[in-house]
């Protein structure tokens, strides 16, 4: 029972941590970020299992994580009002070619990061963008102005 309780606490902690870190940081991992994730995984494993290296303990932790993940997913599906808390909401960062500074600050994004993302999608200038939306997965979707 101790393993299940620790798994629950770590799961909730990781859920909160990923919401606090922000979607953009999680979508673009740099080499240092990858190393931190590996170290975090090892630290989480030690916190979950402590001195229990049994196969039963491992399956108990993995099963608890799986059940919690399915539960969170089901709650987001079943209760639409919980979805923004659990998964976040898309955020408009550019509207009619104008950058929305307030939303950039909120998500810790710079104009140059948005311009870089636009260039990767063959958009030369932000003035050509009708909408740029930071999606819940951290990617930026662009809708360009249509030319008649």
Image (tube, grey):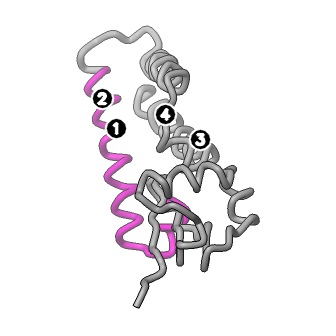
10 Å neighbourhood of mark 1: few (<14), some, or many (≥20)?
some
The answer to whether the residues at label 4 and label 2 have Cβ atoms under 8 Å apart is: no
Q: Earlier in the sequence, mark 4 or mark 2?
A: 4
Give the number of the mark in front: 4 or 2.
4
Left or right of 110? Residue 54 is: left
Relative to the observer, which residue lies in front, 74 or 52?
Answer: 74
Choose mark 3 or mark 1, whichever is in front.
3
Name the residue that disc number 3 marks.
Answer: 17
x, y percentage for residue 65?
A: 36, 38
At label 4, counting other C-alpha atoms closer than 10 Å, the crowd grade (few under 14, some 14-19, many 20 or more) is few
Kindly check if marks 1 and 2 are in contact, taking CB atoms under 8 A apart as contact: yes
The image position of residue 148, as x and y in percent, is 40, 91
Q: Is residue 12 above or below residue 30?
A: below
- Report, in whole angstroms, how far the alpha carbon at label 1 lies from the one at label 2: 6 Å
Return the x and y of residue 9 as percentages of the image width and height.
53, 37
4 or 1: mark nearer the eye: 4
C-alpha distance separating marks 3 and 2: 23 Å
Residue picked out by circle 1: 64
Please tell me whether mark 3 sits on a helix, a strand or a loop.
helix
Q: Secondary structure at mark 4?
A: loop
Q: Quadrant of residue 62?
A: top left
Q: Nearer the viewer, mark 3 or mark 2?
A: 3
Which residue in the protein does label 2 denote? 60
Earlier-in-chain disc, 3 versus 1: 3
């Amino acid at each position: 029972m101790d393993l299940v309780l620790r798994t629950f606490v770590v799961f909730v902690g990781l859920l909160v941590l990923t919401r606090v870190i922000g979607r953009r940081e999680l979508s673009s991992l740099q080499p240092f970020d990858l190393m931190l994730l590996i170290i975090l995984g090892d630290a989480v494993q030690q916190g979950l299992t402590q001195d229990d290296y049994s196969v039963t303990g491992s399956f108990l932790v993995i099963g608890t994580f799986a059940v919690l993940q399915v539960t969170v997913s089901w709650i987001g599906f079943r209760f639409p009002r919980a979805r923004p808390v659990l998964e976040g909401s898309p955020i408009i960062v550019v509207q009619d070619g104008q950058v929305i500074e307030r939303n950039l600050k909120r998500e810790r994004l710079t104009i140059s990061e948005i311009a870089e993302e636009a260039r990767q999608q063959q958009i030369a200038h932000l003035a050509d963008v009708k909408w740029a939306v930071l999606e819940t997965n951290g990617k930026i979707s662009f809708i360009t102005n249509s030319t008649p």
